[in-house]
Image (tube, helix red, strand yellow):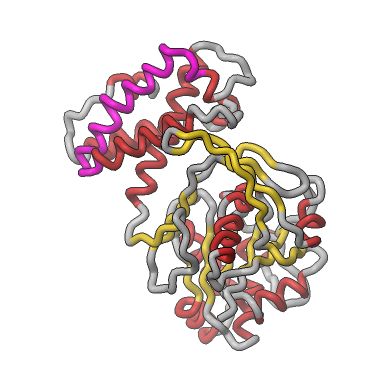
Amino acid sequence: MTGRIMQFGTSRFLQAHADLFVHEARMDGQKIGPITVVKTTPGGDRTGRIAAFKRGHPYPVRIRGYEAGRVVDRTVDVASIAEAFTAESEWFDIVRTFAEETDIALSNVTESGYLLDSEDRGHDYSARRPPRSFPAKLLSLLVARYDAGGKPLLFLPTELVSNNGQTLSNIVMKLARNARLSDAFRSWLAQSIIFADTLVDRIVSEEIPPIGAVAEPYALWAIKSNGFEEPLHHSCVHIVDDLEPYEKLKLHILNLGHTVLVDQWMRQHGDAEETVGHILSRAATADYLASIYAEEVVPGFALHGMGEVAEHYVATTLERFNNPFLDHRLADIAQNHAIKVQNRLGNFISWVRLKESSFTATRLSSCL
């Protein structure tokens, strides 16, 4: 086992998250990486990211913000990426590397990246040309890996999709059935390829062109245990039996807080450029959010036996919200606001009422 990683996606999030963790693990002497980056979609190169990755030089990640009450401002020169390819023009190199050299794969192709493309119907999944959609590309690569001897693989998706590993696995397996690939291949796919559910969390506020990023100190990569060997040891990486507590904390504290602030911003007809930090600089808004957390959110988590951990997470969240180095625009958070209100606020109230049917959350309810 080489520990080599293939990464689908070039995002600044991955640069300041998984790629940084792999770099730090390698500096610690762990046998993990290096990383091969794959640009999966045509166009939109974002000022030459792939060209910069191809040069193989370290890139900067600047960590700025508060951590345990102290100001953090440090830069790490990340050197975990060794090569980069574009699927549109370098598919043969990607196929060879995935089939013969890769032990771990990870992806950050956004939620829409799981959608299939009608042009992929009838694709023969040979190595000659890439399909259009990401799941179909992945199936084509897995067919090549099977044909090359079929080494096992750990796949770590980081898209913000609930049960992302199982979801992606189901899509790929359905594609394999529809393509009438052999029973032997589908059996190997089910038994030798582990798609782990994961949850990621870090605010990466801006890029440093052509590659590099500015990020907050807080970071989390929770990976649901599924019988695999821990890929790396890192303080921000946690192998867990159950992702639900992490998902609930993030959705119903961090994300809920963002949505409450957007609700206040809309009611106040705030400026389009206003940020989370700006709105919280107003004492009335800061007190309002703090009261929701203290009187409605934490008591709701307590009914599920998570009061203490929720209280700690609230304190961490408020520290993150007040990061003076991040320009997190409320107008950006406000996208798809109605859906977010239901998912983050309405579903929280419903979840708590599973334990206490009379639970009331007056302030949260006023946002619905």
Identify the image quadrant of residue 222: bottom left
Looking at the image, residue 293 lies above or below residue 175: above
Q: Residue at x 47, y 34 (%)?
A: 70
Q: Could you say which is closer to the camera, residue 122 or residue 343?
A: 343
Q: Could you say which is closer to the camera, residue 46 or residue 362?
A: 46
Q: Quadrant of the N terminus?
A: bottom right
Q: Quadrant of the C terminus?
A: top left
Q: Residue at x 17, y 29 (%)?
A: 358
Can you give x and y, in whole percent of width and height, for residue 25 in the image?
54, 63
Question: Which residues, given as a range, are shown in magenta?
Answer: 279-306
Tell me if I can see residue 286 in this picture: yes
Looking at the image, residue 350 lies above or below residue 26: above
Q: How many marks?
A: 0
Tell me if I can see residue 171 in this picture: no
Can you give x and y, in whole percent of width and height, for residue 316 in the image?
40, 36
Can you give x and y, in whole percent of width and height, for residue 308 in the image?
25, 40
Whether residue 288 is in magenta: the answer is: yes
Horizontally, residue 348 falls left or right of residue 324, namely left
Q: Main secondary structure of the magenta part?
A: helix
Looking at the image, residue 276 lies above or below residue 306: above
Horizontally, residue 205 falls left or right of residue 184, namely right
Q: Residue at x 58, y 67 (%)?
A: 105
Looking at the image, residue 323 lies above or below residue 272: below
Q: Residue at x 77, y 76 (%)?
A: 128
Identify the image quadrant of residue 357: top left
Can you give x and y, in whole percent of width and height, for residue 144 in the image?
66, 80
Whether residue 364 is in magenta: the answer is: no
